[in-house]
Amino acid sequence: MSVTLYLGCVIRSLYPEVEKAVKETLNRVSIHFEEPKDASCCAPLGFFSLNRNVWLRLNERNMRLFQSTVVTACDDCFASLSDAFKIVSEKNGIKAPEVKPFEKIMMEKLEERGMVFSFKGLRCAVQHSCHLLRPARGMDDAENPRMVKRILERLGYLPIPYEGELDCCGGLVFEDRMSRVLADRKTRALEESGADCVVVTCSHCMRQLKSVSKLPVLHLAQLSALSLDVKPGEIGVPETLVRRMVKP
Amino acid sequence: MFVKHRFIRERRGLISRLREKGAGDLLKCIQCGSCTSACTVNAVDEEFNPRRMIGLITRFNKLPDQDPWLCATCSLCVERCPQSVNPLSIILALRMIRHEDGNKLPDKVAEMIEQVKKTGFAFPLNQEARDKRMLLGLPEFRISEEGLNEIRKIITEAGF
């Protein structure tokens, strides 16, 4: 199986350890990937909300560079690319490549191979990405998301419920005061949840929660790679978390 | 009669301006308030009220005062709207109109646009990340000069 890997600006520039984790995971589940080096930012309307034409033209250009199913590692990229591709392909009458978030391809692989990993007991509070769920793009239930939790269970972790699970973290609010109010509200809920760590699938959630949360914030790919025996140090998983896990 | 006529024309003016910028079908709005009761930002700041913003446009032909940049783009309003109005698309169109009318962009947004123009990416690679990438054996990434010119052309042609 061969895919186009689209990591996005934030992961490549700010979180190389997540990039490493995504690549190690794909390697270990035998998904071959290539990265078109000339692809640009996906210019999501959340911050590029100035001109729809720029958003569409930048992604029309990206689309030309992608030859196979596109796998994203950030749910904001997923939403931006899939929405733009849909409009561009309808306008030009050409077939757009499929866009799948990392968690979707991971779920498919785990199910296809019947993979279940030993229980590690790490309690995970999932930060559900708004842009994975809404407006519904057929990936998960918009009001009662389960996909990331099911993946975590298969990987041997313990997803836990908590108050305000669906609340937005405010990671894409560019007005500082409001961004902070939403971040604080979310962090309080996460810290009171009794979780050992927070799990995200969107790089804006990651940026936002890392800036305020006392809990370690990990991308699902980091926990996936850890279950697949990648050394924690290579993928930025803190030792304190590894020590807390149940030994098989 | 004349007044009524002018009123309708002006109202259409604002609505068609919003529509050009991707706003959904505003006139289907029944002012039920599902958007506001779902709104992430309204829950912490009652002044930010999508129902009221849409009502001001459709019923009074007025541009709302509320800062559309407060919106978190969480899209709950889109999911919950019983009329499929897509309130988020209206708020995004309001951002575009404000920009067109000469209002300043949030600093972080302006900075990201500059970065995309310069490098093709919204978030620049700093030295710490560069070192970390090398340590992890990750490849360098840079868009070709030809590619960058294409990207810059798209952005500058739109007037940025």
Image (cartoon, coloured by chain):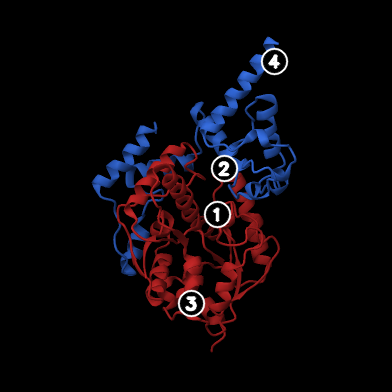
| Residue bearing mark 4 | B4
Q: Residue at x 62, y 28 (%)?
A: B63
Q: Quadrant of residue A73?
A: bottom left
Q: Which chain corresponds to the colour red? A: A
Cα distance, mark 3 to mark 4?
A: 64 Å
Say what amino acid the circle numbered 3 marks: Glu
Chain ID at mark 4: B
Q: Nearer the viewer, mark 1 or mark 3?
A: 3
Give the structural element (helix, strand or loop) at label 1. helix
Which residue is the site of mark 3? A112
Q: Chain of mark 3?
A: A
Front one among A18 and A184: A18
Find chain B in the image and tell me its colour.
blue
Pick whichever, B119 or A175, lies toward us: B119
Circle on res. A175:
2
Relative vertical location of residue A224 with respect to residue B29 in this rendering, above or below: below
Q: Residues within 10 Å of mark 3 (few under 14, many from 20)?
A: few
Mark 2 Cα within 10 Å, few/some/many (few <14, many 20+)? some
- Are labels 1 and 2 assigned to the same chain? yes
Which chain does the numbered disc 2 sit on? A
Q: Secondary structure at mark 2?
A: loop
Residue type, mark 4 in image: Lys
Same chain letter for marks 4 and 1: no
Q: Chain of mark 1?
A: A
Judge left or right: residue B67 versus residue A81. right
Residue B57 screen position, x and y as percent: 65, 29
Label 4: which secondary element: helix
Q: Residue at x 47, y 77 (%)?
A: A226
